[in-house]
Amino acid sequence: MHDIGRRRAWAIWAAALSAYGVAIFHRSSLGVAGLIAADRFDISASQLAAFTVLQLAVYAGMQIPVGVLLDRFGSRRMILAGLALMTAGQLAFAFTDTFTAALATRAVIGAGDAMIFVSVLRLVAVWFLVRQAPMVAQLTGQLGQVGAIVAAAPLSMALHGLGWTRAFAGFSTVGLVVMVAVALLVKDSPYRDAAHEVTKLRALARSLRVIWAHPTTRLGMWSHFTSQFGATVFSLLWGFPFLVSGEGLSRSTASALLMLMTGWIVIAGPVLGRIVTRHPFRRSQVVLVVVAASALAWAVVLLWPGQAPLWLLVVLVCVIATGGPASMVGFELARTLAPVQAVGRANGLVNIGGFTASLLTLWLVGVVLDLREPAGPSAYDLADFRVALSVQYVVWALGSIQILRYRRRAIAHMHRHHPDELEAMRAGTPAAHLGFTSH
């Protein structure tokens, strides 16, 4: 009914992208409110981390159900449902003053957030050409970070100028405006007879086993696991306290660094998108290079004698921010074999990776901080953060080993079942939706 990759596709993508920006804002809102939240609810570091850990745990746990529902109901309905949940959760968060109730609202926000990103990626898969999709997917991930910019500066100013309740309640209403845009503009497919897949429970379990069994799906998941968590842990919770309490920066400078981090993502995303489009055979190797750079940057900062200079912290946030665009490569890897009707489930499985790593790391950092400084967030110093943030190296090591393992398996699988497409990828031609085959 409509031309793929033309004006209508871009209008649909823009509306869906605005929903993703709202999701990023709600996800990132505690990044600048963490210290205020610790005072408001009178909680420890591990309890503060519980907000984000629970939010991300719900997000990760919802990925498979969301993938199934997405393949059944389509992107438009899922995005609208996600926006409704996030708006309600953030509004409730504005008025609650107890730790338990606040936890429940973050869980609702996580459930709504879980529905957005994979729904937008499905629209990219069906509305754009194969040669366009990698770049549009990268743009989705990077331009959506505008929500993080809003969380880093305007929300920080609103919290100090308007107070907790009015700031969060006011920003929660943005979701209502975006819901109208999505309802008016988004269409699930350019094809007249596009069918949504209805799967019975037993067949669903079998289909998930098939999707998970293929090495490109697992390679995508581990790529997402290894590259995404560093930027998420820093921007969602521990970056702001580290910069203020550990490195001695002012709140305004720390907020500026979080904004710079987001701005760098917008720059790095298209660059990585172009690289992986031109060199599809090297995609997982690009992820490993970004991971190695992040580990090196953190090593320099954590081993620096005394507080690191500002220029080094600028380098740090830019390097670790590149992990966000690198994690998008995971979806491209999974898309190599996944047929269009299974994209929702494949993306859901990939998306579990990074957020599982993120919530694990968030929790571990909080536990280490509590062990080192029982007095709470107000007593943290640089030495405490140096020890706590070193737990990232365990997660990087695990993920890198798995990437190398499944890269070999993916190449061997494609050599057996798709040798022509594998050679085309070596020559620089991207491939997608080749279809699953038995081992």
Image (tube, helix red, strand yellow):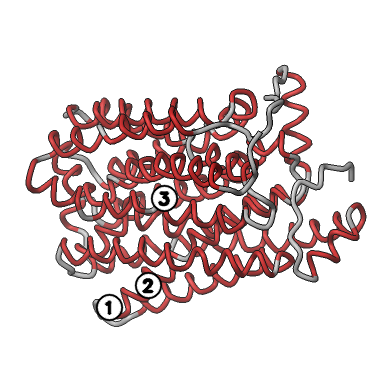
Residue 295 versus residue 193: which sits nearer the camera?
Answer: 193
Callout 2 secondary element: helix
Residue labelled with disc 2: 316
Label 1 – label 2 distance at C-alpha: 10 Å
**Label 1 to label 3, Cα distance in Å?**
30 Å
Disc 1 is placed on an element classified as loop
Going by the numbered disc 1, the residue's amino acid type is Ala
Earlier in the chain: of badge 1 and badge 2, it is: 1
Position of 148 compared to 275: left or right?
A: left
| Residue at horizontal 66 percent and vertical 52 percent from the top | 220
Question: Would residue 80 appear left or right of 213 to someone viewing this image?
Answer: left
Q: Is residue 403 above or below residue 159?
A: below
Q: Residues within 10 Å of mark 3 (few under 14, many from 20)?
A: many
Q: Residues within 10 Å of mark 1 (few under 14, many from 20)?
A: some
* Visible residue check, residue 108: no
Q: Counting residues from the N terminus, which is met first, the one under dot 1 or under dot 3? A: 3
